Image (cartoon, grey):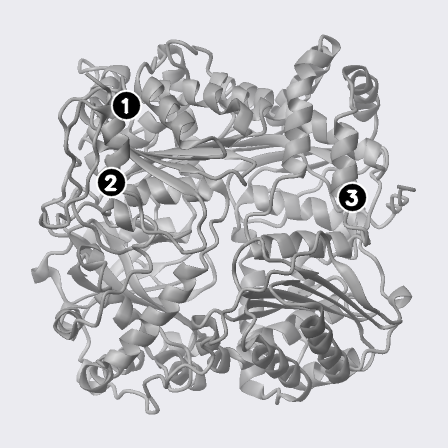
Amino acid sequence: MSSLATYRQDLRHRAVPLAGVLLTGALLSTAVAAQTAEQSTDAKAAIDDVVTPRVSPHDTRDYRVLTLENGLTALLVSDPDVDQAAASMNVGVGSAQDPDDLSGLAHFLEHMLFLGTEPFPEADAYQGYLRRHGGSHNAFTAPQDTNYFFDIEPEALTGALDRFSQFFLTPLFNPDQLESERNIVHSEYMARIRDDGRRELDVLNEVLNPDNPSVGFSVGSRETLDPPEGEASLRERVIDFYERYYDANVMHLALIAPHSLDELETMVIERFAGIADRGLERPVIEEPLVLEESLPLQLEMQSIRDSRHARFMFPVPDPIQHYEHKPADYLAHLLGHEGEGSLLAVLREAGLADGLSAGVGRSDERDALFTVSISLTPAGAERLDEIEATLFAAIDQVRDSGLDEWRYDEQARLAEQQFRFQQHGSPLQGAMRLAMNLARYPVEDVQYAAYRMDGFDRELVERYLGELRPDRLLRFYSAPDVEGEQTSPWFNAPWRKVSNTDQTAAAPLAGLALPEPNPFIAEDLTLLAEQHERPTQLLDESSFALWHMADATFNTPKVEWRISLQHPDANADPRQAALAHLLSGWLDDSLNEDFYPARLAGHHAEAYAHARGITLSFSGWRDRQDRVMQRTLTQLQQGEIDESSFERARYRLQREWRNAPQAALFRQAHRTLTEALVRPQWPTNDLLEASRELDVQALRDFRDAFLSHLHVEALAVGNLDEQLAMREGRQIAELLQPRARKEAIPDLTPLRIVEGLPTLHPVTSREESLVLRYLQGSDRSLESQARLAVLGQLIETPFYQRLRTEEQLGYVVNAGYSPLLDAPGLSLLVQSPDTPSDEILTHIDAFLDAFGERLGALEDDELAAYRQAVHDNLLQRDTSLSGRTNRLWRALSYGDTDFDRRERLAERVLEVSADELRQAWPKLRESATATVSYDPGDEPSDVADLTQHLAPMPEADD
């Protein structure tokens, strides 16, 4: 019998809830219908009868859906333009299936599958193969899904699938790896223990229905992954879980590659048809998420970060069951709107909030929590009842006058525009999205489900609206000054229940209004055919440069603009740098209400500060983009900087800077390294201190001085011709009147490490230990960059394998090429919950010594795959218009006006020889290094003072 069965979608079958996650590039809650399959022994007929997804009219890729005889469903996408192949396997089982006595078992199993199979028993066989061929990999465990994914050079796809498929056929569950991987899972848990999002879930789990299997500790730890003595061993429990739940019938595979559909089909059948068919079905959660008798309920939790949030949650049926009509999205659009008269606008005007979002958060395919989340100011934290009353006034307004078909049709029109000109993103992102959606939707909708809106169903929307009542509210407030009466079991969050207050005593704020029709919706969506190979300079004036590149490769009538407003003194000292951040923050804040409809219509505008000044970034449809650009520039020049908008902008920045010590320790280490070795660069604490001395007049004065002496560089990429780019560029110049010459603008400069540089300690409140060892290249030439890039490719997998898998030093372990600007370097990092930094450093140095011995035996034949992987990664195809624009913008910021430096570097990479690396390695090891380390209790370093003597690395001749 053929291993291929016919796949047909019968839309007449009744809908069955399967899952609560929709991938549209991010994870979103929506709805699902059942899938059915018919068996056939005729493989050729099966191929002919396969149902293909509904795709954008501009999607030229070929699709094929297979259902293997064992029940596994695979979606194949042939895209001859991709330069990476990618695969994702979604298994319909997750932490909700953890046994009561082994929390985290599903996650632990996910880890174990990477550590050897019968044909490939080495623990790094899979990872090493991917790395040699320019690939990457990862996995995640969710309550009802476990997803495994990778990408790789297309020529190496068959070998990657050989190894990947064996996860689901012959995993070893190697006894020698069990204890070490249990330690790694524990390290992962400890790395997240101070994450406020995890802490909120931990507290929320304490009040949700304990019988709902999604309510529990999902990460796992040494404590939870330790079966009682005398019972089945951990390995036996892992194998039992695997055999109980891992089954071809609950597996959905997505594969994107440049190969033909026939080739991909053969790959899948040959490698996945042997996966066990145990006749299983995806587990379904039957127990309610929230017990009705527990509501209404008010909770308070002590946060670690200096931020205040109120989340208003209402249990609703999981809207994934109604994805064709999206009733929850309709309500989220109205309650989460940020335009004039919106709930957020009213709260902002009163000084109570600075951010708001609405939509379905947690879901389990049966139930969900519709959540309105509000970021509060300190004043807002004192007026929660008033905010709640205003929320219910907004809900009443929607109920009374917001259920209009034209509003739904407007949302549907925007969704259809987005789908019509959908950009696929990277093959890896696409494969993950499709594998997840394949498990949830009819085949026709795996691409379309996120955008599908079949018509306004007033009764359905009213049903959801009826759930948003005060007696069904779960209010969750978090702030650093909350005094807890209990501590959450796994993430140690102090929390308490609060007596429900009399809401009738609080009056809602006035001024609420429903959105008007959106004036920013694009009308002209004509695709222009003009295509350029690289940007050309249209204007080259002493104070203004304009670059343009017509680009039609993404089949979308969109344009990306980047406009850099540069000033000689924008980053001269922390005060100037803080003012540049404040000006960009004020600009975004002051335009928020005006531009929220524009964002909904697909037009995005953002201002951000950097070492040379401020960049304005515009992304959106060609049609009507000029309105957004002109409004932004006019506001920058003429908008009133009042006290309230200044304070909002400063509060957000100060909150961000105050919370910097709470960031992941490895991120803080890299920031410390950048502060040490790049000029100009100001530490977060210096910016925070400078901002405290500023007032609204200081910002007004800074704006006047900043705009009076600008150098402007602009880049336009996308579906616009030279005439339009020139016209809009001239308008920019006329509005801004730049005067500064390019020579007046200081460059960002990497510094050379010298002997005697002391170990640097970051400013952090984390409780783990860390070492970041940085080896700097000899110069900024292409030759030096090429050598270190290849060394980085060589070093990554063995470093990870030795220090993480074998020596179990921590969960965050990585090494690789890490340039600072164009100064090449190698970074080696370990973050550990229980190994002190001096011990970590000993392990790193021992590895470096052993790696030198490996280089001594390296042959050019072995090196070839690593060289090719670096070459191909450098030349990797852009997967979106914004990604291409950002790459070209970075090149321009580095002075690469020929836009060919990456091509020249890629050519040089292919010339790197094993002998060259052997000669370079001793010099790299003997030269001065930078070390960032931390143990709990370490005093932070004065990085600026300790590195003030470092000299710039000279520019290279090439």
The part of the image, by quadrant, that contains residue 727 is: bottom right
Tell me if I can see residue 939 in this picture.
Answer: no
- Residue at x-position 16% and y-position 26%: 40
Number of the label disc, if any, that sits on residue 226: 1
In the picture, the quarter occupied by the C terminus is top right
Residue 901: give its label: 3
- Closer mark to the observer between disc 3 and disc 1: 3
Considering the numbered disc 3 on the image, is that residue within a helix, a strand or a loop?
helix
How far, Cα to Cα, is label 3 from label 1? 53 Å
Q: Position of residue 294 (x, y in %)?
A: 11, 60
Residue at image position (29%, 75%) is: 409
Looking at marks 2 and 1 on the same chain, the residue that comes earlier in the sequence is marked by 2
Label 3 vs label 2, nearer the camera: 3
762 sits to left or right of 435: right
**In this view, the mark in front (2 or 1):** 2
Q: Residue at x 49, y 70 (%)?
A: 525
Q: Are marks 3 and 2 in contact (CB under 8 Å)?
A: no
Label 2: element kind: loop
Q: Nearer the viewer, residue 219 or 85?
A: 85
> Residue flagged by tag 1: what amino acid is it?
Asp
What type is the residue that disc 2 sits on? Gln
Which tag, 3 or 2, sits closer to the chain's start? 2
Residue 144 image label: 2
Location of residue 87 by image quarter: top left
**C-alpha separation, residue under disc 2 versus residue under disc 1:** 23 Å
Residue 660 pos. (x, y %): 57, 55
Q: Are marks 3 and 1 in contact (CB under 8 Å)?
A: no
Q: Identify residue type, mark 3.
A: Arg
